[in-house]
Amino acid sequence: EVVVADTGPGIPPEEQEDIFRRYYQGRHAMGQSEPGYGIGLAMCKEYAALLDGQVWVESVPGEGASFFFRFPRVDAPKEEALPAPATAKEPQNHSPRTFFRISETDTPKPRILVVEDNRELLGFLQNILSEDYEVQVAVNGEEAYALMEQQPDAYQLILSDIMMPVVDGFGLLNKVRNNPSLGFKPFLFLSAFNAEEDKLKALRLGVDAFITKPFETIEIKTQIQNMIRNQELRRQYLQTIDPAGMKPSAKAASSLPNEESRNEAVNVSYDEKYLKELEAAVREDIANPNLKIADIAFKLHVSERTLRSHIKMYTGLTPSAYVRKVRLAQAMLFIQQRKFRTVKEIAFAVGFNDAPHFSNLFRQEYGKLPTEYF
């Protein structure tokens, strides 16, 4: 039996059962400068149940409280310990800010970044999410942004509180959305919005979704799963669209599950429209070998930083790789139309000064040299 006692204000009899319910906060917690989230005692009760034990509280208001944790004594099995496998490696000294469990498969889990300054809630989020994701944590926006700058492609989703020291959630979201390498990341706010203007501010900054405290475990797990999955589905779909004709292939059509096609149709339609405008902006000046991303951004009435972020988000390509893909697609179209007589003419028409270099890139893209089509 384990007993933890304090000399605090005590707990009224009518609340002594409720305090073990998840997210419940008693009246005594309301006046505290840093109240908890009502998670710790609920987890204690769950752990007690796992051990066939019990947990309860005894308290007299004004005289403190005593928490009892009782579980049955079990004799350890008298068996010799098995020797460690010869190939076993010593455990590595992983960062304390990375939380993971050993997976039964070699398939890597999606990695998410959880940003929360409350240690109790942070531990709870790690516990419920680590089964499906590799979870890395930060305690404020400044620390989170530093981690993302070090590894821009490391995280599939960012889950962040709003009220935090140093840099809050709004500041972190603003930094992420204005970084071309990070701006496309799904961003989920976990917070109790006390004012409508806070929610509007988050929407203006580009948040993808909200989870309101208190929340159910299934709610946050489902939201994260859907956001990561939809991001990947959209990217897979858009990568199968032919830049020369902007028509989705059969593979693209089958990439969306039937039961969710309608839900995705609006997003895909908008994305397709945006890609058409982007491609048109490139084609307008496709013969210019010095075409710059800034020039394309000007035509689309967005900043260069925003455009770089959009290209990465929608296509999975760097801006230069995307422009090159459009140039080569236009070259293939010219070949099919028999518009030019020589490879050199086609190369110049789509913005390549070096015909041999153009031919090599064309073969990498389509598997044949352009001369094989003449």
Image: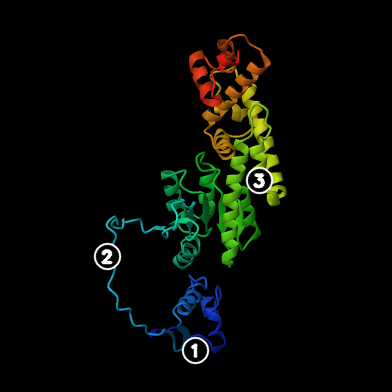
Per the image, the residue denoted by label 3 is 256
Residue type of the residue flagged with mark 1: Pro
**Which quadrant: the C terminus?**
top right
Is residue 142 visible in the rendered structure shown here? yes
Per the image, the residue denoted by label 1 is 61
Q: Quadrant of residue 219?
A: bottom right
Residue type of the residue flagged with mark 3: Leu
Q: Residue, x 68% and y 16% (percent of image)? A: 337
**Which quadrant: the N terminus?**
bottom left
Q: Local crowd at mark 2 within 10 Å, few (<14), some, or many (≥20)? A: few
Q: x, y (%) of residue 340?
A: 63, 11
In this view, 151 is above or below 297: below
Farthest residue toward the top?
Answer: 341
Q: Residue, x 51% and y 25% (percent of image)? A: 364
Question: Alpha-carbon distance for marks 3 and 2?
Answer: 49 Å
Is residue 206 visible in the rendered structure shown here? no
Per the image, the residue denoted by label 2 is 83
**Eye-nearest disc, 3 or 2:** 2
Residue type of the residue flagged with mark 2: Pro
Q: x, y (%) of residue 11?
A: 50, 85
In the rendered structure, which disc, 1 or 2, sits on the residue that comes first in sequence? 1
- The answer to the question of whether label 3 and label 2 lie on touching residues, with beta carbons closer than 8 A, is no
Q: Quadrant of residue 27?
A: bottom right
Q: x, y (%) of residue 42?
A: 51, 76
